[in-house]
């Protein structure tokens, strides 16, 4: 494993239930703020991108963004810089609240391909009754996996010459696809969110 990837600049913040959010700085020479500045300069001068790059190299994007984006409220500048946020250890309900944003772009841990039997179930009520409900849902999810796989094997037997490993993966994926409907909204998940700088500030 290339451990240098783990050393890329990033910002994190902790969440309840061991979750956290990470905003990754890929270490590119042109940061999202730089990109937004270059596009803003392009709209204010016909000097060309080479001149704008020279301005960026000389002055940097920090003061520019502070003046024109934050200070003067030129919100369209924020649309020109993007970042990817990685959110882990939150409930599926939290994930759906984020994904409800009409302009959301990103990915969530797939309940179709991942076995969620060991995922933490987040219980905001934290009562005896709610804990029992979550235990019963997990018990049902676990107990039905093999019966569902057996039913699928009988309904869709392996074809002659078909790779057994590929077939087994397909059966597993289909069983997860069927049973994911019985996972409670409190099941913990991970998701990514790719958005622009203006949307980040709004949220």
Image (cartoon, rainbow, N blue to C red):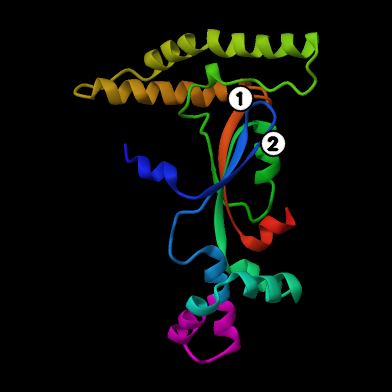
Residue 69 circle label: none
69 vs 125, nearest the viewer: 69
Residues rendered magenta in the picture? 38-55
- Residue for badge 1: 181
| Residue drawn at x 54%, y 64% as measured from the top left | 32
Q: Is residue 33 magenta?
A: no
For residue 143, above or below residue 61 = above
For residue 153, above or below residue 195 = above
Instruction: Give the crowd class for mark 2: few <14, some 14-19, many >=20 residues within 10 Å.
Output: some
Front tag of 2 and 1? 2
Q: Is residue 161 left or right of residue 49?
A: left
155 vs 49, nearest the viewer: 49
Q: Residue furthest left?
A: 161
Examine the residues drawn in magenta and state their main secondary structure.
helix
- On the image, the x and y values in percent for residue 79 come to 62, 67
Q: Is residue 43 magenta?
A: yes
Q: Secondary structure at mark 2?
A: helix
- Asked whether the beta carbons under mark 2 and mark 1 sit within 8 Å of each other, the answer is no
Q: Secondary structure at mark 1?
A: helix
Between the C-alphas of marks 2 and 1, the distance is 17 Å
- Residue for badge 2: 94
Q: Residue 142: which quarter of the image?
A: top right
Q: Quadrant of the N terminus?
A: top left
First along the sequence among labels 2 and 1: 2
């Amino acid at each position: 494993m290339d451990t240098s990837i783990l050393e890329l600049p990033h910002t994190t913040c902790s969440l309840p239930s061991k979750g956290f959010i990470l905003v990754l700085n890929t270490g590119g020479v042109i940061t999202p703020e730089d990109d937004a500045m270059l596009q803003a300069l392009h709209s204010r001068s016909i000097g060309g991108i080479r001149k704008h790059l020279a301005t960026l190299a000389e002055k940097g994007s920090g003061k520019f963004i502070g003046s024109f984006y934050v200070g003067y409220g030129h919100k369209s500048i924020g649309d020109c810089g993007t970042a990817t946020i990685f959110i882990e250890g939150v409930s599926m309900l939290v994930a759906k609240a984020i994904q409800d944003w009409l302009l959301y772009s990103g990915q969530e841990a797939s309940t179709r391909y991942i076995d969620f039997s060991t995922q933490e179930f987040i219980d905001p009520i934290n009562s005896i009754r709610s804990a029992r409900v979550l235990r019963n849902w997990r018990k049902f999810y676990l107990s039905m996996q093999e019966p569902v796989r057996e039913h699928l094997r009988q309904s869709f037997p392996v074809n002659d010459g078909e790779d057994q490993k590929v077939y087994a993966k397909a059966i597993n994926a289909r069983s997860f696809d069927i049973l994911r409907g019985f996972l409670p909204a409190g099941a913990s998940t991970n998701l990514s969110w790719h958005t622009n700088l203006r949307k980040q500030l709004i949220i």
